[in-house]
Image (cartoon, rainbow, N blue to C red):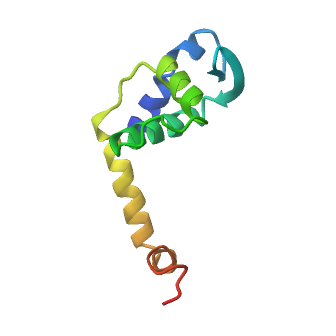
Amino acid sequence: MTALRKVQDGFYLARQFGRDEIDVVNSGAATGKLNLEDAPSEYLEMLRNATHGFGSNNSRRVGLTNTLLAHHDGDVPHDIGFLGYLYLLDLMSQPEVLRGALYRGGRL
Protein backbone atom coordinates (compact mmCIF):
# COMPACT_ATOMS: atom_id res chain seq x y z
CA MET A 1 0.00 0.00 0.00
CA THR A 2 3.00 2.29 0.34
CA ALA A 3 3.47 2.24 -3.42
CA LEU A 4 -0.15 3.20 -3.97
CA ARG A 5 0.22 6.07 -1.50
CA LYS A 6 3.31 7.27 -3.41
CA VAL A 7 1.32 7.31 -6.65
CA GLN A 8 -1.38 9.32 -4.89
CA ASP A 9 1.21 11.74 -3.49
CA GLY A 10 2.48 12.31 -7.03
CA PHE A 11 -0.47 14.62 -7.69
CA TYR A 12 1.51 17.44 -6.16
CA LEU A 13 0.02 20.46 -7.94
CA ALA A 14 -3.41 20.17 -6.37
CA ARG A 15 -1.89 19.46 -2.96
CA GLN A 16 0.31 22.56 -3.18
CA PHE A 17 -2.83 24.65 -3.60
CA GLY A 18 -4.71 22.78 -0.86
CA ARG A 19 -7.23 21.25 -3.24
CA ASP A 20 -8.70 17.76 -3.00
CA GLU A 21 -9.67 17.52 -6.67
CA ILE A 22 -8.33 18.48 -10.07
CA ASP A 23 -10.10 19.99 -13.06
CA VAL A 24 -10.29 17.77 -16.12
CA VAL A 25 -9.56 20.04 -19.07
CA ASN A 26 -10.63 19.23 -22.61
CA SER A 27 -10.02 21.65 -25.49
CA GLY A 28 -9.06 24.40 -23.07
CA ALA A 29 -12.22 24.21 -20.96
CA ALA A 30 -12.81 22.45 -17.66
CA THR A 31 -15.20 19.58 -18.40
CA GLY A 32 -15.23 17.87 -15.03
CA LYS A 33 -13.51 17.27 -11.74
CA LEU A 34 -11.49 14.32 -10.50
CA ASN A 35 -11.15 13.60 -6.79
CA LEU A 36 -7.58 13.00 -5.61
CA GLU A 37 -8.74 9.73 -4.06
CA ASP A 38 -9.77 8.46 -7.51
CA ALA A 39 -6.92 10.02 -9.49
CA PRO A 40 -4.32 7.28 -8.76
CA SER A 41 -6.55 4.51 -10.13
CA GLU A 42 -7.26 6.57 -13.26
CA TYR A 43 -3.54 7.29 -13.62
CA LEU A 44 -2.58 3.62 -13.27
CA GLU A 45 -5.32 2.60 -15.72
CA MET A 46 -3.97 5.15 -18.19
CA LEU A 47 -0.44 3.73 -17.82
CA ARG A 48 -1.71 0.18 -18.23
CA ASN A 49 -3.69 1.09 -21.33
CA ALA A 50 -0.65 2.80 -22.84
CA THR A 51 1.45 -0.28 -22.13
CA HIS A 52 -1.08 -2.44 -23.96
CA GLY A 53 -1.17 -0.07 -26.93
CA PHE A 54 -4.57 1.45 -26.24
CA GLY A 55 -3.14 4.95 -25.80
CA SER A 56 -5.44 7.95 -25.86
CA ASN A 57 -7.17 7.31 -29.19
CA ASN A 58 -10.47 7.31 -27.35
CA SER A 59 -11.66 10.90 -27.80
CA ARG A 60 -13.61 10.75 -24.53
CA ARG A 61 -10.41 10.13 -22.54
CA VAL A 62 -7.99 12.58 -24.19
CA GLY A 63 -8.83 15.38 -21.74
CA LEU A 64 -8.52 13.04 -18.77
CA THR A 65 -5.22 11.64 -20.05
CA ASN A 66 -3.76 15.09 -20.59
CA THR A 67 -4.97 16.24 -17.17
CA LEU A 68 -3.46 13.23 -15.41
CA LEU A 69 -0.13 13.69 -17.18
CA ALA A 70 -0.06 17.40 -16.37
CA HIS A 71 -0.84 16.95 -12.67
CA HIS A 72 1.31 13.93 -11.78
CA ASP A 73 5.05 14.01 -11.22
CA GLY A 74 5.52 10.76 -13.20
CA ASP A 75 7.21 8.88 -10.37
CA VAL A 76 5.74 5.36 -10.21
CA PRO A 77 7.26 2.99 -7.63
CA HIS A 78 8.55 -0.24 -9.15
CA ASP A 79 6.62 -2.37 -6.67
CA ILE A 80 3.23 -1.07 -7.85
CA GLY A 81 3.27 -4.08 -10.18
CA PHE A 82 2.62 -6.30 -7.17
CA LEU A 83 -0.86 -4.80 -6.97
CA GLY A 84 -1.94 -6.89 -9.96
CA TYR A 85 -0.55 -9.98 -8.25
CA LEU A 86 -2.61 -9.20 -5.13
CA TYR A 87 -5.76 -8.92 -7.26
CA LEU A 88 -4.93 -12.29 -8.83
CA LEU A 89 -4.47 -13.90 -5.41
CA ASP A 90 -7.75 -12.39 -4.25
CA LEU A 91 -9.53 -13.75 -7.32
CA MET A 92 -8.03 -17.21 -6.87
CA SER A 93 -9.13 -17.29 -3.24
CA GLN A 94 -12.77 -16.89 -4.32
CA PRO A 95 -13.60 -19.91 -6.52
CA GLU A 96 -17.17 -18.75 -7.22
CA VAL A 97 -15.94 -15.41 -8.57
CA LEU A 98 -13.12 -17.08 -10.50
CA ARG A 99 -15.59 -19.53 -12.06
CA GLY A 100 -17.77 -16.64 -13.15
CA ALA A 101 -14.80 -14.81 -14.64
CA LEU A 102 -13.56 -17.83 -16.56
CA TYR A 103 -16.73 -19.58 -17.65
CA ARG A 104 -19.21 -16.94 -18.87
CA GLY A 105 -20.88 -16.33 -15.55
CA GLY A 106 -20.43 -19.91 -14.35
CA ARG A 107 -22.32 -21.44 -17.27
CA LEU A 108 -20.59 -24.12 -19.28
In the image, is residue 51 above or below residue 99?
above
Closest to the observer, 70 or 17: 70
In the drawing, does residue 14 fall left or right of residue 95?
Answer: right
Q: Residue at x 57, y 29 (%)?
A: 64
Q: Residue at x 28, y 36 (%)?
A: 78
In the drawing, does residue 15 fall left or right of residue 33?
Answer: left
In the drawing, does residue 42 fall left or right of residue 26?
Answer: left
Residue 26 position by quadrant = top right
In the image, is residue 34 above or below residue 48?
above
Q: Residue at x 60, y 29 (%)?
A: 36
Residue 27 position by quadrant = top right
Q: Give the residue at the far bottom of this rendering.
A: 108
Q: Position of residue 82 (x, y in %)?
A: 32, 49
Q: Residue at x 52, y 84 (%)?
A: 106
Q: Position of residue 20 (x, y in %)?
A: 66, 23
Placement of the N terminus among the 4 image quadrants: top left
Residue 85 position by quadrant = bottom left
In the drawing, does residue 102 fall left or right of residue 36?
Answer: left
Figure label count: 0
Q: Give the residue at the far top of this rendering.
A: 17
